[in-house]
Image (spheres, rainbow, N blue to C red):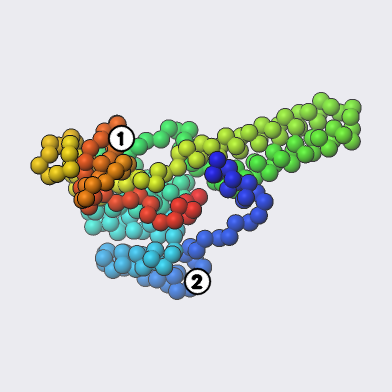
Amino acid sequence: MKTFSIIIYLALILARPEKVLGQDQSSDDLFRRAAKELENDNFDQALNYFNTLISEGHFAPELFLKIGNAHYKKNKIGKAVLAYKRASLLAPNLPEARQNLKFLKESQGFIDFEKSTFQLFVNRIPLSVVSLILVAGLWMIGAGFTFRILKPKSRTSSTAVILFGFFMLLSSFFTSIQKDRSKLPPNSHIIISTNALIRSSPNDTASTVRALSSGSDVIVISERTNWSYIEAPDNLRGWIRKDYITKTWPYEVNLIP
């Protein structure tokens, strides 16, 4: 329901734009310098520049895409997957991020919580489009009732307009619910360590439940000292060292559309 509230808000007023690249010359210059360092294979310097932009509050899908490219060229697969997924969270329709994730999944064998085709389709519908459907539905309902009052003899036409308006209203409501259900869990993490071991108890001598590749998704259920009790895809549960994982989105949640 949170998404539906946001949709209604967007339908009534213009949202204040978030701080992103392109709003000031200094951030654009730093981004260009970072991209140049990346082209010259100075990956660490490029990452320093990119991370500076993030620390200053600049969030853009192309920024995380470049970070992913830098980590990939350093053979840091888990961190590359993490960056590409962050880019996809900001822009679900970004083809480069989707293609890179697909390539890494096929080549590295990491596992994630797969979404259905319908969920992927819903996620790619911008909130602005859902808001327009909501506004159009409300407008058609109002127009239908007005037409019915002014021209009582045209009940069939006005009823059709009203019903279609309700259909659009319900469609926007249903879509917003589905977008809420498919949102990233706040305790979602990604494995950044190579061949991370899930163990049966929180110590290094415990039996191994399974080894997971870099880039795999996990959900943290609880924590104990240096260990996290996690759930991985396929209903797999166990303990993993905290330094093997990183939170998928540690920034403000409202930055994700």
Image mark for residue 26: none
Instruction: Please tell me which residue is depicted at 27% across the width and 40% down the height of the picture.
Output: 230
Q: Earlier in the sequence, mark 1 or mark 2?
A: 2
Instruction: Please tell me which residue is depicted at 59% across the width and 45% down the height of the picture.
Output: 5
**Percent coordinates x, y for residue 196 in the rendering:** 19, 44
Q: Would you name the residue on which mark 1 appears?
A: 233
Residue 85 appearing in the image: yes
Quarter occupied by residue 165: top right
The amino acid type, in three-letter code, at marker 2 is Asp
Nearer the viewer's eye, disc 1 or disc 2?
Answer: 1
Answer left or right for 148 relative to 7.
right
| Location of residue 243 with respect to 238 vertically, above or below | below
Q: The N terminus is located in which quarter?
A: top right
| Location of residue 192 with respect to 17 vertically, above or below | above
Most foreground residue, 220 or 140: 220
SS of the residue under disc 1: loop
Image mark for residue 24: 2
Answer left or right for 111 relative to 30.
left
